[in-house]
Image (cartoon, grey):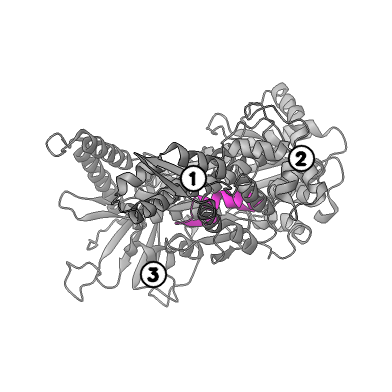
Amino acid sequence: MPASPTTDPLQREREHLAASRAALRAMREEAESLDIRDVTGTWVAAVVLQNQITSRIAALADLAHTPLFFGRLDYLHAISEELAEGATGESFYIGRRHVHDAAGDPMVIDWRAPVSQPFYRASRTEPMDVERRRRFGYTGGELTAYEDEHLSDPAEADTASALLAAEIEKPRVGPMRDIVATIQPEQDEIVRADVGGTICVQGAPGTGKTAVGLHRVAYLLYAHRERLARTGTLVIGPNNAFLSYIEQVLPALGELEVAQATVQQLVAHVEVRGEDDAEAARLKGDARMAEVLRRAVRAGITLPTEPCVVVRGSRRWRVPAYELVEIVEELKSREIRYGAAGEALPQRIAHAVLLKMEQGGEAPDDRVQDAVARNPQVKAVVKACWPPVDPAKLVHRLLSDEEFLARCAEGILDEQEQRAIRWARPGRSVRTAPWTQADAVLVDEATDLVQRTPSLGHVVLDEAQDLSPMQYRAVGRRCTTGSATVLGDLAQGTTPWATAGWPEALHHLGKPGAHIEELTKGFRVPEEVIAYASRLLPAIAPGLAPATSIRDTPGSLSVTRIEDDLVPAVVEACRKALAHEGSTGLIAADARIPLLAEALAEAGLAYLTPGEETTAEARLTLVPASLAKGLEYDYVVLDEPAAVVEGEPDERTGLRRLYVSLTRAVSGLAVLHARPLPEQLG
């Protein structure tokens, strides 16, 4: 669209914003007025079409405090097909969704469109035919400022964007918001990567890896909507608090149909009521358990010793035992699911009977074969040779029956390891068994061995470093024919089975050829804070490069030794943090949460728990260190680092938990301690 000159550029941009909002309202009203009564043939088609219209109306919502567009590109040459070749002065406004006027001409271009890509990628060394990139600043939904970069002007100095920095540092109240206005070139490369490939992102704290993964989903749904609408997309997070925190990002980008779940919710075949010790959980999550389960599933297969005799009318058809053995052996040798093989076995036996019928001069057809497959004698052979398997009952037996486990685990797990994973007090049935989270993953593996798990088109797996090999397999089953975006930080692995390296993790996921990207430039955590936390890296992840930050914020870190009672000092630190705009998180070892909760209540400081949405009235969240991962707050008060470390089963895991806790702050971190700090912090 040609840019029209005006003596007041800011006013012109405000007028375009008002016109764009009016156009969006018109688009929504048009969708609401659609009458589908005369265009649907059946009630099913009517329901489907009405659901599509409802989704369209929801996607066209104009969010009052969300800018409709955040940037503008002025190209040196025209790129629209309808403009004459060689025309100049074409401009495009870049926003969260496409908006067009009554004539169909674009007023705002979707940030995912190819024409928008230079907004994120163009630079002075590679301007991509962009003469000017304009960024807009907003206050409460009102356009209040703009900032220009003349990328094709060699005389203009290369300076940091003040509006970009202001957007990154904007106080965080409420759930996580999108970063569509601040995506950086290295992030955009990941976001726009092809849907056919799996990408693994090793991202240090504050590098935006979670936001990159969510924006990648939004981009893929834009670029491959029909394909992914058919196959589905899923975002997997570490816990419900994390999922609550990120749940508004995709709807703000106009994507309403993306499912969210934790790994535990994916494998919820049994009711979890028990808890493993660290060693049992580690062993149950070991990839070797996959072979143990494969043996267990097939343990009931037996070879026939008697012929199968089928009576049809006045004739008897006999399949000798050796032929039945050949059929069963052939199915055993094939790598197909146990249930599918069990369904194929009666058809194979029936086919052998049909061959004998043909040799006897009869001309049977497919209906006869189906009838023979349902014959009681055939069904009896199948039940004896290939008995049905209930996955939950199978795992229950495996963890309860010492002899059965020893037989299935022979040569895989030693006696001590077998003893570690067996239940000390097994329940009498599946319903009363002391199932743990690791057990549920085993049931999921067994379920897939019996019947193939349906695959989705794309899966985003966040905080992936904490998954066990068996959990990776569970996630991988959900994207066997699709792709995945794997997000994590090896330095933040806080489970006993945390992955040691991404190639190994991707192998268990079933995506060994995935491309690994590393993000080390931070945008959220101040340089002073990330440098302090990075002192732990040699002890917790010696192979990782320390992160850097674009935000040099002097005074963002304070470390204070308290000689008297620590708790009142922590409460006072929370008061000071709340004097600033934005959210505050008080992070402490899980064991100290009740003590601090009581102190906050006595001091009259209302607080939230992780997963509850912060508001202007309630901005303090009391966070157990075990739930801090993936969350962020403008100001963080960290209570007693030594207690955070001691709250884990080993020092390395404790230091990793501390590393997570130290890197949740956006504007300021206050560390308070009465006991000596871990020596790794210097």
Among the two numbered marks 3 and 2 on one chain, the one whose residue lies closer to the N terminus: 3
The total number of labels drawn is 3
Q: Which residue is mark 3?
A: 150
Residue 72 place in picture, x, y as percent: 34, 59
Which label was assigned to residue 308?
A: 1
Label 3 and label 1: CA atoms lie apart by 84 Å
Few, some or many C-alpha atoms within 10 Å of disc 3 (few <14, some 14-19, many ≥20)? some
Q: Amino acid at mark 2?
A: Glu
Give left or right: position of 556 versus 160: right
Q: Which residue is mark 2?
A: 402
Residue 482 place in picture, x, y as percent: 45, 56
Label 3 and label 2: CA atoms lie apart by 74 Å
- Determine the secondary structure under disc 2: helix
Residue 613 place in picture, x, y as percent: 54, 33
Residues in magenta, as a range: 463-486
Residue at 22% from the left image edge and 39% from the top image edge: 45
Give left or right: position of 274 versus 266: right
Q: Amino acid at mark 3?
A: His
- Mark 3 vs mark 2: give the one in front: 2
Answer with the quarter of the image where residue 403 lies: top right
Residue at 60% from the left image edge and 36% from the top image edge: 392
Label 2 and label 1: CA atoms lie apart by 35 Å
Q: Is residue 244 above or below residue 151?
A: above
Among the two numbered marks 2 and 1 on one chain, the one whose residue lies closer to the N terminus: 1
- Determine the secondary structure under disc 1: strand
Q: Amino acid at mark 1?
A: Cys
